[in-house]
Image (tube, rainbow, N blue to C red):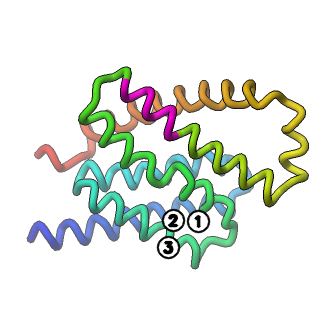
Amino acid sequence: MNKKTRSIALSGLFSALCISSLFVSSVWPTGQLGTVAFSSLFVAAAVIELGVFHGTSVFAISSALGMLMLPNKSVLIIFIAFFGYYPILKIIIEKKLPVPVQWVLKVAVFDCSFSVIWFLLRRFLPSFADNYLRINIFVIYLCVNAVFVLFDYGYSKLLTLYKSRISTSGR
């Protein structure tokens, strides 16, 4: 198969799988955050198999189709705000930088994304934000950063499993 044809076909496949997973997340009342995180694995697979350009295109296509197709847009907001582009940054950061710098950058990216989401929640859902404003913001950031570190560790393990068992890029 021609390399260009393979790239386009795999990008379409990964986009379809990503949007399907996002659709399940938008209609399933529980486990939405986990399903959105699962959707990001298709973006990571595109980066591993085809490169950053095609991974970015899978993210963009999935985001655009999500705007049109998903009944619950809050899932898409979470995908666009963090989970969609994070695999691309993660793979680039981990390929080129020493480990301490990797962690500083990854936590900084997460904190920026979380700050934007927090601001949007306070702006557009004041009743939701009022319930959580009683908790010190430092405690909230400490807790979500701890969860992020666990997420990143697990995500790295899943990407390693993908590269060793499923990926065709090394064959």
Q: Is mark 1 on a helix, strand or loop?
A: helix
Q: What element carries label 2?
A: helix
* Sequence-first tag of 2 and 3: 2
Residue at left offset 23%, top offset 52%: 49
Residue at left offset 65%, top offset 44%: 115
Q: Are marks 3 and 1 in contact (CB under 8 Å)?
A: no
Quick one: which residue is furthest to the bottom in this view? 68
Which disc is residue 20 wearing? 2
Task: Give the amino acid at mark 2.
Answer: Ser
Say above or below: 148 vs 109.
above
Q: What stretch is highlighted in magenta?
A: 101-109
- Predominant secondary structure, magenta span: helix
Percent x, y of residue 100:
37, 21
Report which residue position mark 3 lands on: 64
Percent x, y of residue 31:
67, 47
Report which residue position mark 1 lands on: 23
